Image: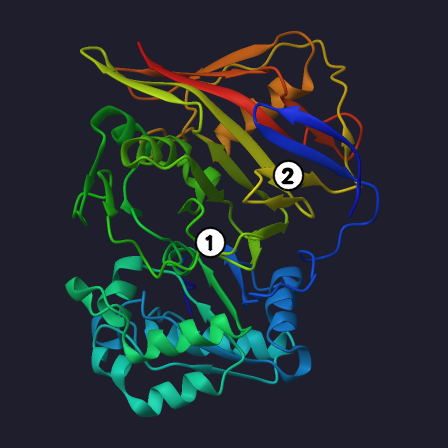
Amino acid sequence: MRVPSAPARRTVLAGGLVVALLTAAAPASADSRPDRHQTGSLVLIGGALKENNTQVYGEIIKRAGGPQARIGIITAASVPESQDPHAGDPALCSNSACNGAYYADLFKRHGAADAQWIPLDIDHVANADSDAVVAQVESMTGFFFGGGDQYRYITTLLRGDEHKDSKVLAAIRAKLAHGAVVSGSSAGAQIASGPDMVSGGESYESLRDGSAPGYFDDPTRLGYIHQGGFGFLRSGLVDTHTGAYGREGRALRLASDTGHDRVYALEENTALVVDRPGGAREHMTVLGPNGVAVLDLRDARAHDSANGWSLRRARYSYLTDGDQYDAHTWTARVHPGKQPLVPAATTPVPANTDVFYSAANPDGTPYSFRTTARALASTRAQNSATATTFETGPRFTVTFTKARGSAAFTGDGTTARTLIALRIDIAPQ
């Protein structure tokens, strides 16, 4: 089938973000100290979760009960069988039922006692209020939401424009509150968002034209759903496939336009594990080969002029495997396997003329924004670097700066891996 897309040794003040360097080995997941308001947890993946990612699948299963885990698979973001021309071909199908069976098999292969497709899609919206399906949900210890189009989750589980919990979503919400794990990839992670959930858009058009509430046929237009998704994670906006699709620009523009001061920008095949979501002790851990960018707009200022939109004093942090983050205190704890990087390179940062990996550029490369940020952190030849958009009219320039409090951490002693609080400025040319 085609898959749908501990105590700190010292602290560094990083532009309002406090970085703690751990002295003990960080756990595979966030701390487990008791909380009077203990809830379940979220495992949100930025898309393209590989079949062999035992780290992420294992984390979901562990949190769902380990060998006793029973995972409910929800793939209502996929098209239904009626809209899949390959529905009858197991090698080519990509619909809700086919994708549900795919993930159920994967979770079983990774060690879950059971995994079942929850029969929901846009052709079976009534199932969201079925007592039989609610009973199926209540027998599960964890849930996985697949990728596709997050707006289909609104259609099926939030009763569309009514935007109220169906019986099935209410049951999942109750399970989360009592300790279950809710996970999702791509659209399945996006739908965990609170207000102003992104519904589409590309970075260049977002910077040029701004955002608007709604869901648009034009995939380049920056749209958002003001009422949001399921609201499981409300401490920041959520975006997915960020570096792979060059979405840093759209994430910054949407946050600025809608008054949010933080974005969790999730990378592919990598998870943001959230303990006690929504509580005062909301705590996060990054798991996987890429990372999660935290975009901080608390001190940022946007300006519209005849020349175009600009943004000043945003901050970019890029957390990688094992790093932890406290949403309430804006504190990042860097895994002890990484050490502060002392830049040794004397070469300048390579030119970057496609900072947001434009779909219009046949020679572009993914993770372009991150590449320039890491190159700057790794050199002592310069304290700032610029990169531009591929498109013109206007062309936007992104300036990366090692501002006061910026820091980088390395695992090999030479190259930057985790980045803390680089200043980001965007301006039209």
- Color encoding of the figure: rainbow
Say which of 64 and 227 sits in front. 227
Q: Dot 1 corresponds to which residue?
A: 47
Q: In this view, does 367 lie above or below 193?
A: above
Residue 429, quarter of picture: top left
Which residue shows up at 52% across the image and 38% down it? 293
Viewer-side label of 1, 2 = 2
Residue at mark 1 to residue at mark 2: CA–CA distance: 23 Å
Crowding at dot 2, Cα within 10 Å, few <14 / some 14-19 / many 20+, comes out as many
Q: Is residue 194 above or below residue 163?
A: above
303, above or below 109, in the image: above
Q: Where is residue 284 in the image (x, y as percent from the top left)?
A: 59, 51
Is residue 85 in view from this perspective? no
Answer with the quarter of the image where residue 354 lies. top left
Q: Return the residue found at the far bottom.
A: 132
Secondary-structure class at tag 2: strand
Question: Which residue is pictured at 69% across the width and 48% down the height?
Answer: 322
Q: What residue type is labelled 2?
A: Ala
- From the viewer's perspective, tell me whether residue 137 is left or right of residue 310: right
197 w.r.t. 152: above or below: above
Query: Is the residue marked by circle 1 packed among few (<14), some (14-19), or many (20+) residues within 10 Å?
Result: many
- Residue labelled with disc 2: 332
Q: Can residue 306 be seen in this view?
A: yes
